[in-house]
Amino acid sequence: MKLPRLRRVQWILVLAAISVLVLAGTALAYRLLAPTEYYQLAFGPDAATRVLLALRDDTLSVHRSGRLEETAERLARDEKSQFHFEVVEPDGGRHTVCLTDRRRIPVFEDPLQEGKFSIWVKVNGAYWQYAAPPAVTDPERATAVHFNGPLSIQPMLDGAPWSRDEPTKLVATIRSGGTNGETSPAAVSSERDFFPDVFPVAELEFPHKDPTRPPIRVTAELKEHC
């Protein structure tokens, strides 16, 4: 027996309403059960200035003491799915911090960008550094990303063997942190006009095919920014 047309319409509306409620309930449950993700930032030559970030859903809490605190500054995403705030060091250093959701905004692939969020810092208004560390759910396990620290040049090697018969790309980054195991590195962005006319020189040493002869040494100027 077929239902009257009006009755069928009513049932369709009821099912649609139930579907909406189920979806809304799922979204609410996700918001309530989603874990808080923590990131630790460090600033200065000795990484003494610490900032702990706590991200839950669309709210970022900035704990400027480096520890969980009740008076944390709370920020909402902007229209570009980003969070913005400033960090001031005791010596007067002033930095602009921007967190970008890598899942919503396409970004380039980079070994230093493992996590869901890219952390960009404009260091003293002069140049940009970036990293994307993996988030952790325990604030005590968050490794600090070191910004505005002593800079060094580090090669980015993938472990693949080099062959004299094939061209090989040598890539290096200018970064701070990550050398002592206590902090993780933050790279300097070459896309943001940092020393545009300065090019590092790499010194390479290859073993000679004749083990009785000295190794072969060559130099290569890294002229391309990427």
Image (cartoon, helix red, strand yellow):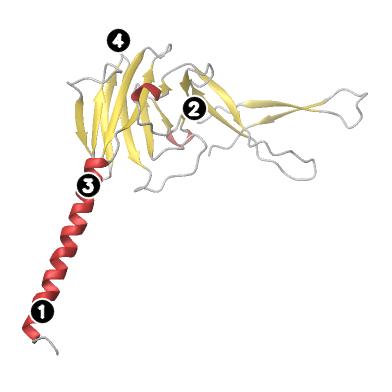
Q: Secondary structure at mark 1?
A: helix
- Residue at the spot x=63%, y=34% of the render? 157
Q: Secondary structure at mark 4?
A: loop
Camera-side residue of 48 and 72: 72
Q: Amino acid at mark 2?
A: Phe
Give left or right: position of 165 versus 48.
Answer: right
* Tag 3 and tag 4, C-beta contact below 8 Å: no
**Distance from Cα at disc 4 to Cα at disc 1:** 67 Å
Q: Quadrant of residue 38?
A: top left
Q: Amino acid at mark 3?
A: Ala
Name the residue carrying label 3. 29
Which numbered disc, 3 or 2, marks the residue closer to the eye? 3
**Distance from Cα at disc 4 to Cα at disc 2:** 27 Å
**Distance from Cα at disc 1 to Cα at disc 2:** 68 Å
Camera-side residue of 138 and 147: 138
- Within 10 Å of the Cα at label 4, are there few (<14), some (14-19), or many (20+) other Cα atoms? few
- Residue at the spot x=54%, y=37% of the render? 225
Give left or right: position of 32 versus 92.
Answer: left
**Distance from Cα at disc 1 to Cα at disc 3:** 30 Å
Q: Amino acid at mark 1?
A: Val
* Tag 3 and tag 2, C-beta contact below 8 Å: no
Give left or right: position of 145 versus 86.
Answer: right
Name the residue carrying label 2. 195
Name the residue carrying label 4. 90
**Residue 34 spot, x, y in % from top left:** 28, 41
* Marker disc for residue 9: 1
Farthest residue to the front: give it. 1
